[in-house]
Amino acid sequence: MLKILVAGSMVPSILGPFDGEVKAASLKSLCSGKLSFRNIHTNEALEISYLNRKGGFNSMALTKLNHLFRCHFNGRAHRINPDLFLLLDAVRSQLKVRQRPYLLISGYRSPRYNLLLRRKGHGVARNSYHLKGMAADVCIDGVPMAELREAAVSCKVGGVGCYSDFVHLDVGPMRHW
């Protein structure tokens, strides 16, 4: 049982593991273990098995994904939360378009680039999950944004926002807009 420190005393918690971790892990049953992307800013493409045969994360694949998801503004890579890949895989599987790559509009965003976007009035959050390696803005050719959004919302993991030309997915608290 997990114990939480409250005002100097130990209080048992019935919550157990962080709810987001439990939900992300439950996505594995929907996942193929494979993802494909094309970064629209660098035109790099990647098709990769990010899960190994035992269902664990493939560290070499994660390194390649971290590189692909780097900030296109300054080229800096950042560790991407692997649960985001589970979510992306589950969404694509639900849509039954596993053969189609995601078009990656934005993965990791450096603090400087995020600030630049804020100053230009792009409406990005000050503490965006992109800064933490926990978010991606994506689309899939031939899939309407509303369908992509609904598939993501049905996963009941993280944040989902629908815009005119992409859907934002993150592995933060569950919410949608």
Image: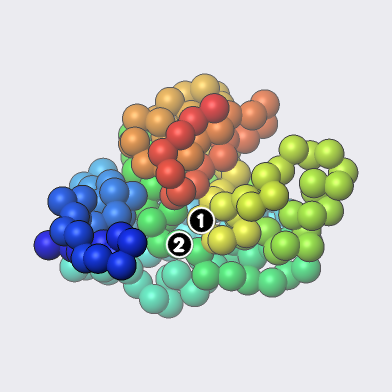
| Image position of 148 (left or right of 91) | right
Q: Tag on residue 134?
A: 1
Q: Amino acid at mark 1?
A: Met
Indicate how the structure is coloured in the image. rainbow
| Image position of 165 (left or right of 116) | left
Report the residue that reaches farthest toward the left: 1
Quarter of image, res 158: top left
- Reading the image, the residue beneath label 2 is 81
Work out whether residue 42 or residue 25 is closer to the camera in this orientation and state it. Answer: 25
Work out whether residue 72 or residue 80 is closer to the camera in this orientation and state it. Answer: 80
- Disc on the earlier residue, 1 or 2: 2
Report the residue that reaches farthest toward the bottom: 60
| Image position of 152 (left or right of 65) | left
Asked if marks 1 and 2 touch (Cβ < 8 Å), the reply is: yes
* Residue at 87 percent of width and 44 percent of height: 120
Q: CA distance from mark 1 to mark 2?
A: 5 Å
Location of the C terminus by quadrant is: top right
The answer to whether residue 130 is visible is: yes
Query: What element does badge 2 sit on?
Result: loop
Q: Tag on residue 60?
A: none
* Residue at 63 percent of width and 71 percent of height: 77
Quarter of image, res 115: bottom right
* Residue at 37 percent of width and 41 percent of height: 157
Query: What element does badge 1 sit on?
Result: loop
Location of the N terminus by quadrant is: bottom left
